[in-house]
Amino acid sequence: MKREKIIENLQLKLLTIRDLEEFNKLLKYAFQVSKNDLFKSGWNSEEIKQSKTPILEKAKVLGFFDNNNLVSQIALYPMRMNIYGKIYSMCGITGVATYPEYSNLGLMKRLMQEALNHMRKNQQSISCLYPYSIPYYRSRGWEIASDKMTFKLKDTQLPKTIPTHGRIRRVAQTHPDLLVLHNLFARQTHGCLIRDQLAWDEYWRWDSEDESVAIYYDLHNRARGYIVYLIENDVFWLKEMVYLDTEAHMGLWEYIKAHRSMFDELRGSNYTNESLSFLLEDGDIQEMITPYIMARIVDVSMFFEKYPFDRTNYQGKILFHVRDPLLEWNHKSFVFDCKKLSISDDLSCVEKEVSLDIQTLTTMLLGYKRPMYLKNIGRLETDLEVIEILEELLPEGKAYFSDYF
């Protein structure tokens, strides 16, 4: 059958619970998840169905159907994240999949276009995803926004700690103190996801039931930090460490050290963008940095409305020439008025100009790369005077993003 005829026969629909079987079937095929893989993870097929049901209830899944057969899909999660102290409505993208016999028909590009339209209507000015291919998503406007650092150290290399006066309690994964603590952490941490029930479900989805949660409480019985971990085969696996102050940080490491008789090696993940080795007396450890989450500004005007520019030293206007491969409402020039903190289409009387694509704008505003660096590698076209202004205007700090969906 000719390409045009195949496309003509396809129907774009919003999935419902009735499409759950087709939804799971496409995911398992695209990501090659076998029954054996599920069994090793502690899941069976029926549990997978039950776990995915809330996605179709709380999220939006768009798909192309050939008759009643789902052939391409994309899932949109309604989420919120902290961007330099401002809470943004964000759309998390996952479940991107197409059967190979329907590839090269432009289906995913059309689904992404529809998804971005949906986000804009829902006031979600930014989107995040975990990429299976960085070049693929870059070509559609997403860019790297945060890193994940994995590390490995011996039990003799654990950091020195100072005495603390609080206590540690092991709690259930659904303990209310854990939820409150993460919410406090997220609201003071740039880039962090504000986890609702859907986000927590995704956080725990593929983890073993043997994973433990330990919370540090101070002398006033306030939850100040937590770790998520698993001890297996003489290895202490540290999934995440979150703390609100130095006392909790030290207390959590003391708790880990109390397990030294149970492991020879500690392996973990770090999302703080700071090297662990500097904290260690013996800093000769293995650390590996890999790109983690990619982000995309969905609507430039909407995103700028809340963004916390520092207008202390500059109150003029800057003309942003933005290139966007998919969205015509971003693919134009914006006049950003620092004095009134607004965007307009009036291009007159503007002396400062900068030209960049939507990918560069996103990674710059999220703090992954600074303006001077982006100019030096040819991603940002302007003069040094504008670079100095941008360096003053933009807040500092890289994003902390530890979630996966």
Image (spheres, helix red, strand yellow):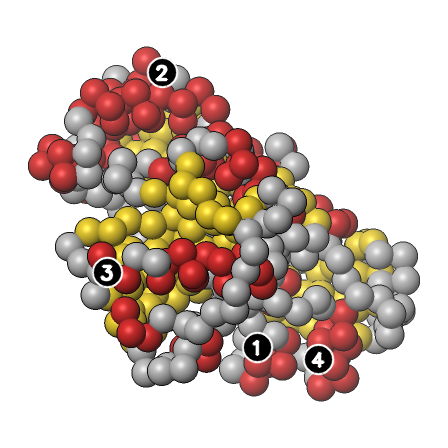
Q: Give the mark, 3 or 2, whose residue is nearer the N terminus.
A: 2
Residue type, label 3: Ser
Looking at the image, residue 386 lies above or below residue 349: below
Q: Which residue is mark 1?
A: 374
Mark 4 crowdedness (10 Å alpha carbons): few <14, some 14-19, many ≥20: many
Residue depicted at 28% across the width and 62% down the height? 260
Give the quarter of the image for residue 241.
Answer: bottom left
Q: Give the mark, 3 or 4, whose residue is nearer the N terminus.
A: 3
Disc sitting over residue 387 in the figure: 4
Horizontal arrangement in the rendering, residue 7 relative to residue 196 (left or right) = left
Q: Give the mark, 1 or 2, whose residue is nearer the N terminus.
A: 2
Looking at the image, residue 286 lies above or below residue 17: below
Q: Which residue is mark 2?
A: 17
Give SS at disc 2. Answer: helix
Residue depicted at 42% across the width and 37% down the height? 171
Residue 268 rendering spot, x and y as whole percentages: 33, 61
Task: Compute the Cα span from label 3 to label 4.
Answer: 53 Å
Residue 130 rendering spot, x and y as whole percentages: 39, 51
Q: Is residue 174 visible?
A: yes
Q: Quadrant of the N terminus?
A: top left
Q: Which residue is mark 3?
A: 261
Task: Compute the Cα span from label 3 to label 2.
Answer: 49 Å
Task: Compute the Cα span from label 1 to label 2.
Answer: 45 Å
Residue type, label 2: Ile
- Asked if the residue under mark 4 is in contact with the one under mark 3, i.e. CB atoms within 8 Å, the reply is no
- Asked if the residue under mark 3 is in contact with the one under mark 1, i.e. CB atoms within 8 Å, the reply is no
Task: Compute the Cα span from label 1 to label 4.
Answer: 10 Å
